[in-house]
Image (spheres, grey):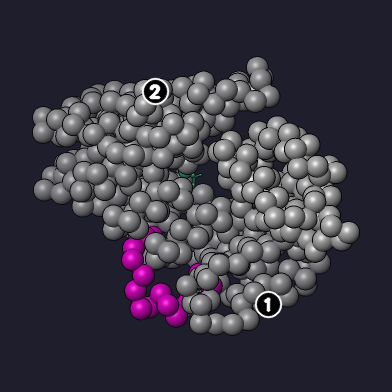
Amino acid sequence: MALVVQKYGGTSVGTTEKIKNVARRVARTKDAGNDVVVVISAMAGETDRLIGLAHELSELPDEREMDLLLSSGERASAALLAIALRELGYPARSFTGRQAGFITDGAHTKARIKKIEAKNVLDALKEGMIAVVAGFQGVDELSHDVTTLGRGGSDTTAVALAAGLNADVCEIYTDVTGVFTADPRIVPEARKLKAVSFEEMLEMASAGAKVLQVRSVEIGMKYNIPIHVRSTFSEEEGTMVVPANKDMEDVVVSGVTYDKNQAKITVVGVPDRPGIAKALFDPIAEANINVDMIIQNVSQDGLTDISFTVARTELPKAIKVIENVVKEIGAQKFITDDTIAKVSIVGVGMRSHPGVAATMFDALADEGINIIMISTSEIKVSCVIEDKYLELAVRALHRAFELDKEGS
Ligand code: ADP
Ligand code: ASP
Ligand code: MG
């Protein structure tokens, strides 16, 4: 008997009809003789709806309250799925993140899992039940407040639970048939990848491919949990996210990804002296805001400009911090830009193939797209551009690296 962890995303449970469909799918897995644990997301649009309500009341809603609010979406769908399963004649029990034993740190809205005390889930399995776990949430180990794991966090709930329970497989069911060479909604000729390495998937996810949350891939990689990304709506085999193997090394670029959730802050007229970067970025880190790219210009007359990017959703919070910092360090002013986006190419073969970045810059130049910032890692090149050119850029790069062709 195998232990299978399945996660169903928001669009897979968007209506009660779809919840019934998921229940039937879960039931088939149970009928095949497996123990089944299901992790469930909020119904499609529910998390955004709740965020919208909070923003009608406050520009910067308190993060502890946000977590309690947003966790309700997943709780509702978990209970609904358990109800649907029972209706089909399958004993099922739903759990909140706390009941499923997800203990996290206290970083509200993007908490990290510290440990999982899955006794309730294991007891349910022992009783022959299907366990249904509300994704995306846990409980702060110190304050016992409800926390959430960041947007897309149900993926992380699923992979972490698969690791904690030593599951045989973790299946991520979603609204596409796997991981593609680019978002198939933007590039219709994108190809589904049969397999992708943890390393590449990590870079793709951190560059914005939201098909898997970054942390879910980190956990899969750390605990060697193969992740099968596949469709809720078809039986088609999806994409296996697995340790790198030799065949994969041949591919120079395996995917193009994008991230619209980007904003740039430029601090102008910063005194160019030791300790300034620390004075600028420490308070941002203390506010738990992730900084992605950073550029410091050449200084003139002892003054320089420093630009950096943050998630657009975190811009209001970052502005609050920067307003104070600018005064403290004696900078002249700061400017923000929330009309940027990031486009990236990812591939393990880049390590041994020079000239990949140049091909990327050429392709963008051919479309008349200006590059605002660049960053590179061993297996990724990212460019910040104006967001209105994003889809054009993704398509142009997909063509330039011939990703529509088999074996590219
Ligand atoms: P779920 O609600 O199931 O968690 P998400 O919306 O979080 O689903 O993630 C699935 C979406 O990810 C797809 O609908 C697709 O538009 C997007 N996506 C972005 N990049 C990729 C990619 N490279 N391959 C597949 N899907 C991608
Ligand atoms: N419901 C949460 C979100 O929309 C978590 C998830 O779906 O994974 O981000
Ligand atoms: Mg998701």
Disc 2 element = loop
Q: Nearer the viewer, mark 2 or mark 1?
A: 2
Estimate the spatial distance between the alpha carbons at disc 2 and disc 1, rounded to whole Å. 50 Å
Count residues near mark 1 (Cα–Cα under 10 Å), then give few for <14, some for 14-19, many for 20+: few
Q: Looking at the image, is 299 positioned above or below residue 63?
A: below
User: Which residue position holds label 1?
Assistant: 358
Q: Amino acid at mark 1?
A: Ala
- Seen in the image, is 31 located left or right of residue 260? left
Asked whether mark 1 and ligand 1 are closer than 8 Å, the reply comes as no
Q: Residue 50 placed where, x, y %?
A: 55, 24
In depth, the one of 70 and 278 nearer the eye is 278
Residue 371: % across, % down: 75, 63
Can I make out residue 350 in this image?
A: yes
Q: Secondary structure at mark 1?
A: helix
**Residue under the image location 44 percent in, 31 percent down:** 106
For label 2, the residue is 143
When asked about the image quadrant of residue 402, the answer is bottom right
The magenta segment:
239-254
The foreground one among 299 and 377 is 299
Residue at left offset 37%, top offset 78%: 247
Q: Residue at x 58, y 36 (%)?
A: 287
Q: Whole-percent x and y of residue 149?
A: 44, 37
Three-letter code for the amino acid on which mark 2 is drawn? Ser
Residue at position x 46%, y 22% in the image: 68
- Badge 2: how crowded within 10 Å, few (<14), some, or many (20+)? few
